[in-house]
Amino acid sequence: MSLAAVPTSRSVARGWRGPVPPIAPFALALALVLFLSLFLHVQIARAVILPATTIDGPSENIVGFGGVAMAEDGTGGLVYLKRVNGVPHVFVSRYVGGQWMAPIRVDTEEPFAATWPRIGAANGGELVVVWATPFATKEGKLVYELLGALLGGGSSFGPAAIIDSDVEEATGTSPDLAVSSTGQADIVYRVVETSVSNVPLLRPGDVVEQVRVAHFDGQRWSGLGQVNRNPGVSMRPPTQANAPKIAIGQTGNGVVVWQEPDIEGVARIWARRLFGSALDYVLPVSATTFSGTPIGTDADAPSVAVSRLGQADVAYRQPVGPGSPLPGPRIFLNVLPNGESKSGAEFEGASVADSAVSGGAGASVGPPSVDIDEKEDLRLVYDANGTPRVIEGNDKGLTSVLSLGPGFAGSEPFAASVMNPAGGGVSAWPSANAQEQPAVAVREDFPGGAVQTALVSGGAGGPIGELAVGRSGLGDGLIAFQQGPLGNAAIVAAQATAPPSELILSAPKGWVKPSQALVSWQPATSADGPLRYTVVLDGRPQATPAGVLRLRLDPRGLGSGRHRV
């Protein structure tokens, strides 16, 4: 993209790429000898949702997608599984300088099949990748370990480190990885203990399961142990909808949430704070009653976000059953304060986030995705009967709006949504185009309230598999997904760009000769780099070499009078 220096009225300007209205222009006057005065203006590239890029495939060797991540400085990457000589291994495509790099293999030292890949990003191009792989057999069954590798800003990953030496058969492991901008990381995952038989099953199909957490301090992993409150209680069989989730703040402290039955045998949502390598006590999240009547159906699909100061917002889905006090399935929201304005010792209490869902008990409600910005405003996105619902909130309460753009599509519609630190954000969900072909709907919200949407797709088309969204601290977002059935799948990525950061201009002060008319500027930070700057004099673009941050104006084009740059 390009930046054009053209009239301004402040020394700092902020630009735009899309439907967001530009800020008022500003003027900086320079008085020149021969009555030459110079006025500066910055016009900055617009915000756009860029077309999708096919990273790999379509190929019969692509067998899974593990997510996308973006750091505060705009670097990031995505991770997926691809067979090499018939064996699935972990591959990563890095995102650097606004470009996707050629995929590289991560588990180069591991000969056995990989599964459950996940990725996180930190500033400076650092990436953390985790996955599970078998290392032994026990009673004729494979035993898996959970591994992690670090790319510290270079072009290749270091050796794999053991996170957990025994995750049994890696059934339903469903790891969730969160990385702070400083490179600290936390991971939550499940271990189904098939060898344990002394725990009674509360319901048919239940399993004996541990929810475990590990912490990465930037150099090594340390296991924090089991977080679920009662190891003597069986758990619901692992599904995508009841997987545990984790979020981490910029200080390295985070919150983990998971599903676990209570004393009555009903599965609820629970949480714990994480302080580096220390676990706090268990906190109940989900509501057990509604209007004074007990809720007897399992809560699921937890989603969690943590603010810079430590406030945690947790959203979850509450289905209904016979005798339920709820009129239909609903999304609930609960808030754990940051501990400054209010006590952070317990949640404030779960409440319905959106009561305007039609269809009664037969309504269809998808898993929620919640995020929070630096002001602790929140955005919650989910599917209600195929319609995107966007719930926004601040310290004054919640509002509900229908999303612009196409509806949800798929058997279990899910959304992925992130907020920018300054407000606004990027959301995505499986959808379809006018010809009913599968695509991903992307919605970009701006801090000022403007919205733009787009449909993106790649590969050879086909159904949308796993979908993930990552965001930077600059307002840009990465959207990545698997498209196409296994056997002809592709890994696809798109970008929702935001305007570059503030651009600071400099010019001579006082009276100067035309030969001394020099314009210079500080580089504008953007995740959608590299930027190109163009100086325009009286409406005529000047030859501005790429990469320069200053330009001496040709005095032959500066006659007496006023000129605009």
Image (cartoon, helix red, strand yellow):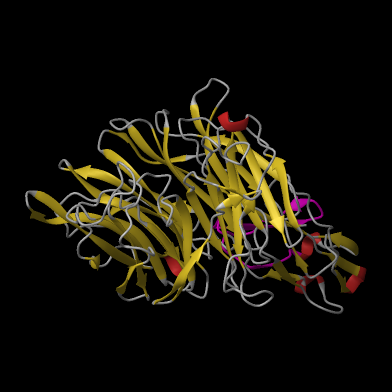
Nearer the observer, 25 or 48: 48
Tell whether position 541 is magenta.
yes
Q: Give the x, y percent position of residue 248.
A: 49, 67
In this image, 351 relative to 517: left or right? left
In this image, 474 relative to 172: left or right? right
Q: Give the x, y percent position of residue 46.
A: 68, 49
Can residue 552 be spotted in the picture? yes
Can residue 469 be spotted in the picture? no
Q: Which region shows up in magenta?
A: 527-554
In this image, 559 relative to 483: left or right? right
Q: Give the x, y percent position of residue 371.
A: 58, 56
Residue at left offset 55%, top offset 42%: 428
Q: Quadrant of residue 489?
A: top left
Quarter occupied by the C terminus = bottom right
Q: How many marks?
A: 0
Q: Give the x, y percent position of residue 121.
A: 43, 63
- Where 166 falls versus 441 (above or below)? below
Q: Residue furthest top?
A: 435
- Where 458 falls versus 340 (above or below)? above
Tell whether position 549 is magenta.
yes
Most prominent secondary structure in the magenta stretch?
Answer: loop
Residue at left offset 20%, top offset 54%: 133
